[in-house]
Amino acid sequence: MSDRLLPAGSTAVVEQVVSGRWFSVSRMFGAEGTMLCWYVNFERPPSWRGDGWDTCDLDLDLVVEPDGSWRWKDEDEYGHGRRLGLITDAEHKAVQAARDEAVAMVEARRGLFAESAEERWLPDPRWAIPSLG
């Protein structure tokens, strides 16, 4: 592991996106490589392309602390999307099942949640800085 630190205020993210799943899981790391939290983003399942994937954020998140405690985030925004008709009844049903799946994964420490919060992670200093465009 490199001793190089990310720029102050930076966050490094390791994200897991799975075909057919209504959420992605990210491990968020601070500038020193220490884990900040797991972040579960509820979204439409990915549509894969040769250079990445497309999805749509559904404004609902689950934040999991390093000690395993968790809390919902942005439930009001999700409800607003439902009221506006941006999230269909079928999508809502899929999200409800995904919520149960994500919480079960957290509580059983499966998937990315099985990894120790004590592990540090920093990007390889040989990696190129990504750019948009």
Image (spheres, helix red, strand yellow):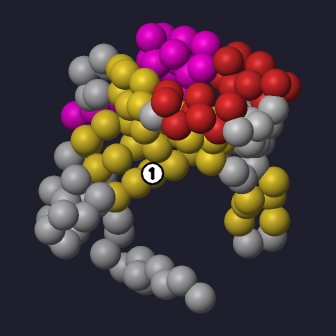
Mark 1 = which residue? Answer: 14
What residue is at 48 percent from the left and 11 percent from the top? Answer: 108
Classify 39 as above or below 79. below
- Does residue 128 lie above or below 34 as drawn? below
Q: What stretch of residues is rendered in magenta? A: 99-119
In this rendering, position of residue 60 left or right of residue 45:
left
Q: Quadrant of residue 66?
A: top left
Q: In which quadrant of the rendered view does residue 82 lie?
A: top right
Q: Main secondary structure of the magenta part?
A: helix
**For residue 67, what is the image quadrant?**
top left
Residue at 42% x, 31% y is 73
Q: Position of residue 51 (x, y in %)?
A: 73, 72
Left or right of 90: which side holds 44? left
Residue at 62%, 47% in the rendered image: 57
Residue 5 on image: x %, y %: 17, 67
Q: Position of residue 112 (x, y in %)?
A: 48, 33
Mark 1: which amino acid?
A: Val
Can residue 113 be seen in this snapshot?
Answer: no
Quadrant (top left, top right, bottom left, bottom right) of the C terminus: bottom right
- Depicted 83 relative to depicted 15: above or below: above
| Residue in the foreground of this view, choosing between 94 and 14 | 94
Q: Quadrant of the N terminus?
A: bottom left
Residue nearest the viewer, comparing 63 with 50: 63
Give the residue furthest to the front. Answer: 84
Q: Is residue 92 magenta?
A: no
Residue at 52 percent of width and 37 percent of height: 77
Q: Nearer the viewer, residue 71 or 127?
A: 71
Secondary structure of the residue carrying tag 1 is: strand
Q: Is residue 106 visible?
A: yes
